[in-house]
Amino acid sequence: MDYSASRRSTLAIAMKPQLPPVPGARRRAIGPVLSTLLAATLVACGGGGADGVSGSFEPAFGLAERQVVEGLAFPPTVPGLGAVTLPDIFPNLGGGGTAVAPDGNGRFFTADKNGVVWSFDITDRSTSIGTPFLDISAKVDSDGEAGLLGLAFDPSGGTNGPLYASYVAANPLRSVVSRFSRSAGNPLVADPASEVVLFERPRTQRIHCGGMVAFGPDGLLYASFGDDTQFNEAQNLAVHHGKILRMTRDGAPAPGNPFAGQAGDAPFVYALGFRNVWRFSFDRTTGVLWAGDVGESSVEEIDIVIAGRNYGWPHYEGTQELSNPQGLPFDMFEPPVHTYPHSAGKSVIGGYVYRGAQYPSLKGKYIFADFVAKRMLGLTWDAATQTVVSVDELATGINFPVTFAEDDSGELYISAGGQLLAIQASDPAGEPTIPNLLSETGIFADLATLATVPGLIPYDVVSPLWSDGAAKDRWIALPGLEQIQFDPVGNWIFPDGSVFVKHFEIELSNSTVARLETRVLWSDRGAWQGVTYRWNEAGTDAELLTGPETRALEVFDASQPGGVLSFDWQFPSPAQCLQCHTDSGGRVLGINTPQINSSYDYGSVIDNQLRAWNHIELFTSDIGPADNPDFATYVDPADPLAPLGDRARSYLAANCAHCHNEQSLFPVMDLRGSIPQDQMNVVDVDPNFDPFGVLDPKRIKRFNKDESVLWLRMQTLTPGIRMPPLSSQRVDSVGLEAVGGWADAGAPE
């Protein structure tokens, strides 16, 4: 099914007087059968108007007028950017190192360029030189820009996990990525003889080496390599020069890499067209990969790196044409997020997006430096509009900054002039105040009835995200009279300061209804944040959670012995909220054209939600009639009258596409509803992973759901295999029936 070619259901609007909406009214979108009946009623009535003239009747709108929302505690007030200082908090520590990596257990490991790794406890401010951890100086060539250049620890390794290192070796000159094991009896010592070489390639020069290694949120190892001054090889997929690679812990090309099956190093390549990415990092909240690419003659650049994209070197340096004999257009390549000329600096040092708790004014800024200009800057990025909001100078006169480091809690450091300096701002300690109780948020005028304050707009979606059988109510609040940028098929763009509320409750086996949680998601200066409020057992108020929690539930389930199912409801942490509300998924998962293009019972009026929202000017421009054939729409996966392919595609789009799309960390499949079926990379395609031992497995196998690995992963609860992997302890029978039936029917389009 291609949702870009709309399959419209009949617009249903009840003939009722136009009345103001009831604040906080908890209503449901009406089903497709009722929608059709209501539309037929309008036709049967002849469309009579208020003046008695046939055909002149204008049905009432579900929303009469827009009301400004006041008194919300979101986004929380954030102080302005204060002075940034770089105190030497380890005054006795010798050497900041060319690379610094945490191991997840409160220790930093620093690399000397000559091949020695040291470790120290970051809570011990009196520490001196540190503890020798690994010495591979006999193998390392440290002339020029060569040396021991990158360190990373496997985030799942625990207290004794291995070290991954990137270095330049001599005789012959080559780039190496290796794994070293720690001593079984002493995790503060690694054995040089334990080296397992994962990736090794020849070099011609000791400059443009790259050298960063890091684990991504997908659990895979990423490594950067410069162009070795062989400029055009940055465009040659067969070699590693000028690339960011992605591999498994054992050094194999990562499953899902965009150039799998091509010759040479292509199966390793994640992205290409770089000159010399010395440092890259992953935003620990969003998973976005940021990189600083060192320029040649005139420009330094900052990139957001996306799988399969080409960043243009050497045809373009930043946005400027450089060596381009074929006249390739700039729009063939992924543009940089930010560039600056060599009058402002000549060697960018890529950094990190600040996600610590101590300095709210730095939150969400990508902090980077320039080695030659001795400056540190903070870039604020608006992911919704894909624009730079600001670039602030944070510090100057830094003694040759070399690399950044991020500790386990998200606080940042910079290695400069042989010192490891903390990055601090003159903010009050602690995060902006988020209310501890739901009753203090300003969202609800009456918690007992869940009546919201005026201006919050209730809505529902056509194809709901599976939430272990819970019923959900949803509201949106825009700041002031700000508006949404509408898209007829894809994600909408919401103004900064938008707030989204979702309430969960579930019917228990004793026929009572338990209030479980209310989630709040909001945008703030280009960054997104989500929190969860857990309701007390009495259902009178809900308390803010700072981490994940569970609640034991018993619900009615006819498939279980005795009709009762016991399971643990999972409350997400703030970080887990953003694992589903991804950038590639548009952050706001349920508000887009195919989900909102449906009828809704506003209490006094039933109206199409797009029509109602357009009437109160919620969009930046008039979108016209809601029955526009170019407007995409999903179907309810539980609707037995809807085409089977539409039901399955709607379910996958709503439940899976926020992670599985071409711009995500998992681009191996594209499950968005707007993608033609032959471009999904799903039907009769071999899976990367088959944990079931199927004889002839496919992701979706035509006429055989039992050999369809996607469907099999939906119906298991085994950790590491279960899909979705987060916040679900029950199998969705509706989704299974829709997707399994689609497979058994031959995956009709």
Image: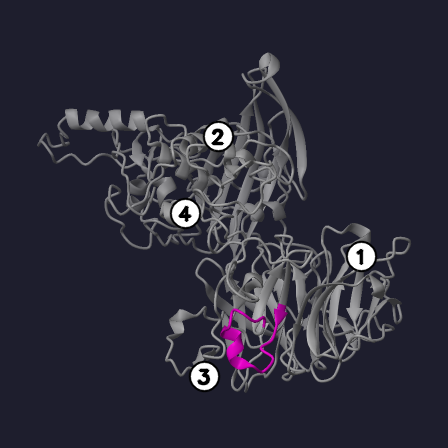
Q: Nearer the viewer, residue 742 or 597?
A: 742
Q: Is residue 345 above or below residue 550?
A: below
- Residue 207 quadrant: bottom right
Mark 2, residue position: 736
Q: Tell me, yes or no, if residue 565 can be seen here.
A: yes
Counting other residues with Cα less than 10 Å from the Cα at mark 3, is it few (<14), some (14-19), or many (20 or more)? some
| Chain-order first, disc 4 or disc 2 | 4
Mark 3, residue position: 323
For mark 3, give the secondary structure. Answer: loop
**Residue located 44% across and 51% down the image:** 479
Whole-percent x, y for residue 544 in the image:
64, 40
- Cα separation, mark 3 vs mark 2, equals 53 Å
User: Which amino acid type is marked by label 2?
Assistant: Leu
Which of the numbered marks, if any, corresponds to residue 106? Answer: 1
- Cα separation, mark 4 vs mark 1, equals 47 Å
User: Which residue in the rendered view is the most extreme toward the front?
Assistant: 695
Whole-percent x, y for residue 421 in the image:
75, 72
Colour basis: one colour
Q: Is residue 74 above or below residue 566?
A: below
Rendered-image quadrant of the N terminus: top left
| Chain-order first, disc 3 or disc 2 | 3
Q: Nearer the viewer, residue 675 or 500?
A: 675
Q: Viewer-nearest of labels 4 and 1? A: 1
- Cα separation, mark 4 vs mark 2, equals 42 Å
Q: Which residues are magenta?
A: 224-240
Rendered-image quadrant of the C terminus: top left
User: Which residue in the rendered view is the most extreme toward the left?
Assistant: 53
